[in-house]
Amino acid sequence: MDDTTMVWIAILVVTVATLFTRLVGPEIMLRVKLTPARTRFLEALSTSVIAAILAGFLARGSLREAVALGIGALVMVTTRNAMAAMFVCIAAAATWSAVLG
Amino acid sequence: MTVTLTGKGVLAGMRRLATIALLVFPFGFGYGAAAINAGMTPIEAIAMSALVFAGASQFAVLDIWVQPLPLLSLALITLVVNARHIIFGAALAPDINTLPRRKRILAGLFLSDANFADMQIARRNGDRDLGILVGGGLVMWIFWVIGTAAGALAGGATEDLSKFGLDMVMAAFFMTVMIGGLRSGTPALPLIVGAIVAIVTLSFLPVGWNVLAGAFAGGIAGVLRRG
């Protein structure tokens, strides 16, 4: 098999694997009876996964990421404006990179 | 409340995430450039982004993108890095599974971090139109693919995105979703447990699996919290 064909097969493999992860969650839950406890589990899961992604990002990052997110969080808490908080966070990280490298 | 998936919802989802999608463009550009440097042609790089639409796994597989391509390793890395999609799908299942099969598949096709988080905001506000999920994913997909095409056609030249703070886009968005959720009554315990477990397990689990561990621990905390 030539290299070009292998590349397209590899793209197909990555595509199918990704599609599987996107579609299998609801399919699994079709086979599971939703009790009140399981509903609470899914509700908590939907928020804790975001917290876990964010915490992992912070743990792998440096002080720059923590400070930028902290400043953004402060803006979010005080103004309740998500877009302003995001832009302040991004600007803080850019400023850190420009000043401290 | 009735769960739907409407065109109106799709448009609303596209509008809601349009700004985030604009900020995804440089990441797409970076991926296109990196893919060319890894030996892909522009068409292959663009096809990868259009078909896969999962930045973290696309960057991850570039690390082992050498001939002969290791198909099994590519599949496993993709599954591990994208395993959080399974959690997203399971969390949205009570809504998604009320839809007919074709719409269920459509709802999952563009599932990603940002539109999943945005759908949580919509659900908190009582909006159960999964078109918001699809539209949010669609607008992100459009800018991801355009960014990839630009980066691939530019021939591999790229800037360090962290210089402009753009590496913080997703984290900043997640931060606003979390704080918004806490303000509107989302229990803090699952978030705290999820975050702690994700950090603790980072030292011995591969990146990606620690997120699964944190998410599951947070889910269990949510069940135990109310006994």
Image: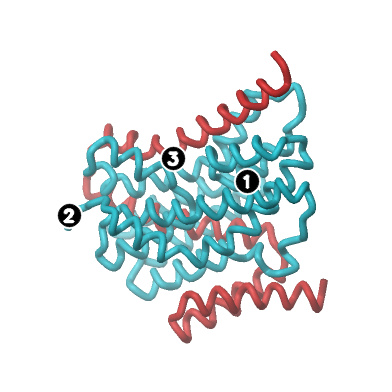
Chain colours: A red, B cyan
Residue at point 30% right, 61% down?
B123
Same chain for marks 1 and 2? yes
Residue B227 is at least partly visible in this image: no
Quadrant for the C terminus of chain B, please.
bottom left
Q: Secondary structure at mark 1?
A: loop
Residue B119 is at least partly visible in this image: yes
Residue labelled with disc 1: B207
Residue at point 52% right, 60% down?
B21
Quadrant for the N terminus of chain B, please.
bottom left
Q: Distance of mark 3 from mark 1, alpha carbons? A: 19 Å
Position of residue A88 measured from the top left corner of the image (x, y, whole percent) = 59, 79
Residue labelled with disc 2: B2
**Res B208 → quadrant:** top right
Q: Nearer the viewer, residue B88 or B164?
A: B164
What chain does badge 3 belong to?
A
What chain does badge 1 belong to?
B
Farthest residue, direction left: B1
Query: Which label number is shown at residue A22?
Result: 3
Callout in the foreground (1, 2): 2
Say what amino acid the circle numbered 3 marks.
Answer: Arg
Same chain for marks 3 and 2? no
Residue at point 54% right, 42% down?
B50
Say what amino acid the circle numbered 2 marks.
Answer: Thr
